[in-house]
Image (cartoon, coloured by chain):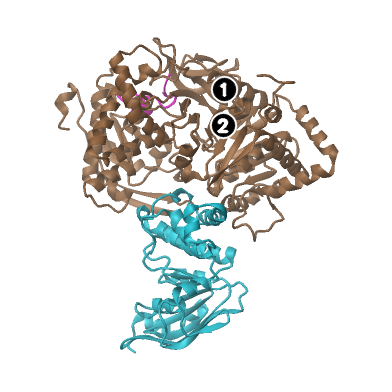
Amino acid sequence: MSAGGSLDTFPKLLRRNALQFADHAAIRHKDLGIWQTWTWAQVLDIVRAYAIGLQRLGLKQGDTIAIVGANRPKLYWTVMAAQTLRAIPVPVYSDAVADELSYVLGHADVAFVAAQDQEQVDKVLSVLDRVPHLQKIVYDETRGLRDYDHGLLMKIDDVIADGRAAIAASSALAAELDALIDSGEGSDTSIILYTSGTTGTSKGVMLSAKGCIDAATDTATFDKLTEKDVALAYLPLAWVGDHYLNYAQGLAAGFCMACPEGPETVEQDLREIGPTFYFAPPRVFETMLTRLMIRMEDAAAFKRRMFHYFLKVARKHGEAILTGKPVPLSGRLLYAIGRVLVYEPLKNVLGLSRVRVAYTAGEAIGPDLFVFYRSIGLNLKQLYGQTEAFLYVTCQPDGEIFADTVGPPAPNVQIRIAESGEVQFKSPGMFVQYFKDHAKTVEAMTSDGYVKTGDAGFFDEKTGHLKIIDRAKDVGRLKDGTMFAPKYLENRLKFFPNIKEAVTFGDQRDFACAMINIDLTAVGNWAERNNIAYGSYQDLAAHPLVYDMVARDISEMNRSLVQEKVMAGAQVRRFLILHKELDADDGELTRTQKVRRGFVAERYAALLAAFYSGASEADISTEVTFEDGRKGRMSARLKIADLPTTHVPADLEKAA
Amino acid sequence: MRSPEVNDVMLRVERVSLAFGGVKALTDVSFDIRKGEIRAIIGPNGAGKTSMLNVINGFYHPNRGSITFKGKSRPRMRPYEAARGGIARTFQNVALFKGMSALDNIMAGRTLKMRYGLLWQALRVGPARTEEIEHRQRVEEIIDFLEIEAIRKVPVARLPYGLQKRVELGRALAMEPDLLLLDEPMAGMNLEEKEDMSRFIVEVNDYYGTTIALIEHDMAVVMDLSNRVVVLDHGVKIADGTPDEVKTNQAVIDAYLGVAH
């Protein structure tokens, strides 16, 4: 990368991009139905004015500014403007309820808040007493805020306009700002990202500017990302993934990030933008496939047959063709026809036609799911990472892709497996410390400077790639000593289209059990086609035919477990379908939609007890939290179903 | 109850009677709607509420009485004249173009604002094109306002009922009306949809300053939203006043509980 001076902070990178890629699109946003574009030169101009505006409001070096909202250009500019002033941006999950919000705002001791709209402003105002040093809330969308007290509030547009006027009035100001940018150091805290709190309260992960840029530059080079690429910025602003993949890599490589119109339009916007770099958690790929399959069920018989035939072709040759391995001529020809008739139209419908590199991470992806996307020619890869590493720990290089590994170490990352089986790493982007939490920082590091991931894993002998089994502390044993890896079972269960979420239990117990959430889209569609009436999720979940269907799925998994010696003893013997969907608002999932197993076990202790008492029914009453924070109670009597376990070859058990 | 500053009378109904053959739909009804207020018309089934709306927007012609809208009194008027005069409405049972997208339906609401004729518009050239872009801009603002970006291009027949109602409101708003008539805007909605719709009604009133007359059965909604309420029963006005006054009115309680007349 060519540069004058060292590019060790994001404001310096922005300045470089404005010179080097002046007329290239830096950011897009669909507003009032039209994609608006800002070039790098324009973004620099805006960010400078914005920074001056914030400075005039009192934001200074070392202050923290919280950012609450969806992926909006003005919120990204807030990050840039704050970094320009050497202040520290602290993005917060926009769907956090007021309580969670107040924790982060209070802990980070924010001086400013940038909020997207009335909803977020209201939340901040409601916890004002816990944020004593708050000076100003700046906001993006005026709607509904007209009659608010504007002593504390200010519109971002006005801040920018004020900054612009100030620059116009005083020529010294621009020079001062440049000097401030020049004085920025690589060791500056670039951002504080709060972890989603899979394991208790969230921690503020402090990342240094140089660490962020080194890591992002490495992976941008690794995947050959350039200023010609486009990414859709739709991931939560507060998540390390968005900050890394879109913001940091975007600035490092100079590519354009496109902000969707709203959270509900992401799918359409994806099609319109046609990104070349794409990241989605396995869940999204899963939903896409489920929806696709449902639509194919409704297609004409001829199309359906064609679809299934060419999928078979793809499964046979797709991976080899994608990685450039030899394929017989007939296979190549068939695949070429399939590409015209099925694969390309399919990718087009999903908005993935132009994708050059796609990643998935966050959870294990079902092997069939992974293979499906690769076989139709999408270069989908896996990475393994965490906030403390500023994302990347491992990632799969082109041509070395396996469904069950997460790849070799990312560039310049060192990994070792501790005695206990825990994965530990050192990486360019690794965090400096947890904000105001020295004890936790010490706990997370080894004495020789490696970061403990808390995940159990091993290097695959054949490929040399890392394999992750589960959270190290979650891997347990049944009473008879059989290994019980809950995540492993849950991931396999979740791969059935009817099952949206599964929570398994078995550590220190006689056998394994599962609580299931059905997928309302898939099962609802099935119910519609079979004339089964239902009024709600609860209705459908309790339907005997649905129980039968889920029982068949779990039995199928049990049968396949027989082939894996270590796991064969951990077959699921009993299950139930929960009366409500697990929800982050109730604390059952993290904000990144991961199950909090311990919490679920506590909350549904009555059900857990019933599993092992042999009861065929159990009563449960739980408190639910609505989006606006109100609470209600939900009670149900749930059926517990038994499953036969398999000791014989699979075919004999078909009747299950 | 909400109370912005309202004073000027926008529409006055004076001694209006309407009969279909021997059936008296409305008898001697008088009330007014003030500029900027939300006015509710309530009453038991068959009280003549929808007939009243139909009289106001010129769909029915009263046998007797007069209607004064924006200072002009008229015995009869056609619906399109009412529309041109700034009265828009939605219907009890959604009346959208089912095969058209949400966007096109709302665009249809702009018809009266188009200056260029059918031919110009079909050709989409010159000034007609510029005009269409202007209108699209206004429509997009409404789509943004009603938060229906995600269904912009979806044919309305495929939308759930609650969203269809929202599109219908959008089409009425596209006319930039002075007076908006809503016929049971929340009928058949679940609680969440009702809350959304209430929010939109208040915001329309607030943000665009549109005067609103609405018929609604959900009393909680009526009492929350409206500045004043008129109560009809068997075609006769039995009460008129603030929600609190109406709530305690004996005639109203009797009408709803079904005491013999």
Looking at the picture, how far across and down is residue A501, in whole percent?
36, 37
Does residue A203 appear in this view? no
Residue under label 2, please give it. A246
Chain letter of the cyan region? B
Quadrant of the drawing holding the C terminus of chain A: top left
For residue A220, which numbered disc appears in the image?
1
* Mark 2 in CB contact with mark 1 (< 8 angstroms): no
Please, is residue B65 above or below residue A299 in the view? below
Q: Say if the magenta span includes residue A318.
A: no
Q: Nearer the viewer, residue A74 or B58?
A: B58
Q: Is residue A485 magenta?
A: yes
Q: Amino acid at mark 1?
A: Ala
- The residue segment tinted magenta is A467-489
Q: Earlier in the sequence, mark 2 or mark 1?
A: 1
Q: Quadrant of residue A612?
A: top left
Residue at 21 percent across and 43 percent down: it is A545
Q: To which chain does the residue with label 1 belong?
A: A
* Residue A470 percent across, percent down from the top left: 41, 25
Image spot of residue A650 (x, y percent): 19, 24
Q: Amino acid at mark 2?
A: Asn
Q: Badge 2, how many Cα within 10 Å: few under 14, some, many 20+?
A: many
